[in-house]
Image (cartoon, rainbow, N blue to C red):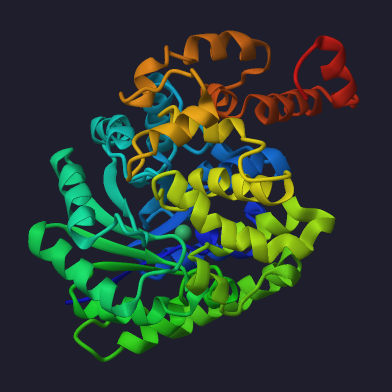
Amino acid sequence: MKVRITDTTLRDGQQSLLATRMRTEDMLPLCAELNRAGFFSLEVWGGATFDSCLRFLNEDPWERLRSLRKALPDTKLQMLLRGQNILGYKHYADDVVREFVRLAIKNGIDIIRVFDALNDTRNMETAIKAIKEFGGHAQGTVVYTISPLHSADKFVETARTLVGMGVDSLCLKDMAGLISPTVAYDLVKRFKKEFNMHVALHSHYTSGMASMAYLKAVEAGVDSIDTALSPLALGSSQPCTETMVAALQGTEYDTGLDIALLSSISERLKKFKDAYPEAKIATFSVDTNVLTYQIPGGMISNFISQLGDQIDKLPQVLEEVPRVRADLGFPPLVTPTSQIVGSQSVLNVVGGGRYKMVSNEVKNYLAGQYGRPPGKIDEAFRKILIGDMPVIDHRPADSLAPELPAAKKEIAAFMENEEDVLSYALFPQVALKFLKERQARKYGVDFDLAESAKKEGYPV
Ligand code: CO
């Protein structure tokens, strides 16, 4: 059976190796050829790209989506959505999730890959329902991790719940690059046997195992694999598109893609990529910390910036991560749990003792505000950390009142189109700054934004 390719260059590739700094103007010149290549889909939006557009690039993420849609008329466009966290780091109310999904599809997204960091399917349900309602393809995601509590049966059970919610396909998401070739084979085999639907495998090259895992998954019947073009492949990114196409060429799994065409796109991409300062600090080599501590590549770079001049403490922090993760009931390490576990591990090492300082995120997590952890939390431990804070067991968004009406009111003066409200609802401070700057530019006003925002009492 022919294997299909989802190329992630413009989302996960540049997120993993260029710190999500790739600009739309460097993407568009590649689109004519990308559109002709014959991919199953192109992952071009979501994940950290939305935040990065507003925060670092002074770009409207919605405008990027519309431009890419126009430049890629014949290829399915895909995005990554963090379930009830949408593209942010906390839970949003259902009205925000629904409206976001509606506008993502309206502006050109075909396939939405939905995941939840805890594999708590309740946090994916609103998004999946909305995708179906607004005519999109809902790809339900099972986040892969290794812990005493995670087993093939458990992953299959999560997938079964997603299938029951009406997803159109399944994705096994190995965000840290931990999946071994044998496990990839076994899990894909189980998924294909239990569910009569498209199964995608997403992995990262971080540990050096991903392309072997892909080959075994292909032999087990995987329908599509995620890869990135060579200039933005390997290291903490995906396996390389051209390599996988070549490896499968002439076999029963032949992708049918033209390596000469792919190389020509890579040739141009390489020139753009080399101009980014981020390209110089990206690691393209194998990171053995992943194998030892099961810590995704992205976390290590966060530790380096959080530790600053205490960088000599990095080995202690790396050893602390699995302990904090165990204390918190073995959450998979992916946004936002990777940040929650990571920051607390740093605090435990540099803060004068374990849990002497506890982040608000850890407190909220222990209070059930991110959903149900995979394992049980020790009650005495929880009590010491959060005191009398109420613990919820229901779906976190059930305690959230609609958020759009207030957002609309607050942003009214700067709103040009309906998408602006969503940018603001997700990232109030960065979006407001962006929208104010956009308005100022439009009227040719050159003012000091930070100053004016301060005067008007807006958060900068
Ligand atoms: Co990824």
Position of 373 with respect to 425 (left or right) is left
Q: Position of residue 190 (x, y in %)?
A: 14, 65
Q: Nearer the viewer, residue 241 or 182?
A: 182
Q: Nearer the viewer, residue 281 or 67?
A: 281
Residue 276, above or below 164: below
Q: Nearer the viewer, residue 7 or 443?
A: 7
Which picture quadrant has residue 4? Answer: bottom left
Q: Nearer the viewer, residue 225 or 74?
A: 225
Residue 95, above or below 234: above
Q: Quadrant of the N terminus?
A: bottom left
Q: Position of residue 30 (x, y in %)?
A: 56, 65
Instruction: Name the residue at 13% across, 41% down.
Output: 164
Instruction: Name the residue at 68% across, 52% down.
Output: 349
Residue 433, above or below 70: above
Which picture quadrant has residue 14? Answer: bottom right
Q: Position of residue 404 (x, y in %)?
A: 48, 15
Total of numbered circles in the picture? 0
In this view, the residue farthest toward the front is 380
Q: Is residue 298 visible?
A: no
Instruction: Name the residue at 57% across, 64% down.
Output: 297
Instruction: Name the residue at 52% across, 62% down.
Output: 296
Q: Position of residue 383 (x, y in %)?
A: 47, 28
Position of 262 with respect to 138 (left or right) is right
Q: Quadrant of the C terminus?
A: top right
Position of 266 with respect to 208 (left or right) is right
Q: Is residue 20 visible?
A: yes
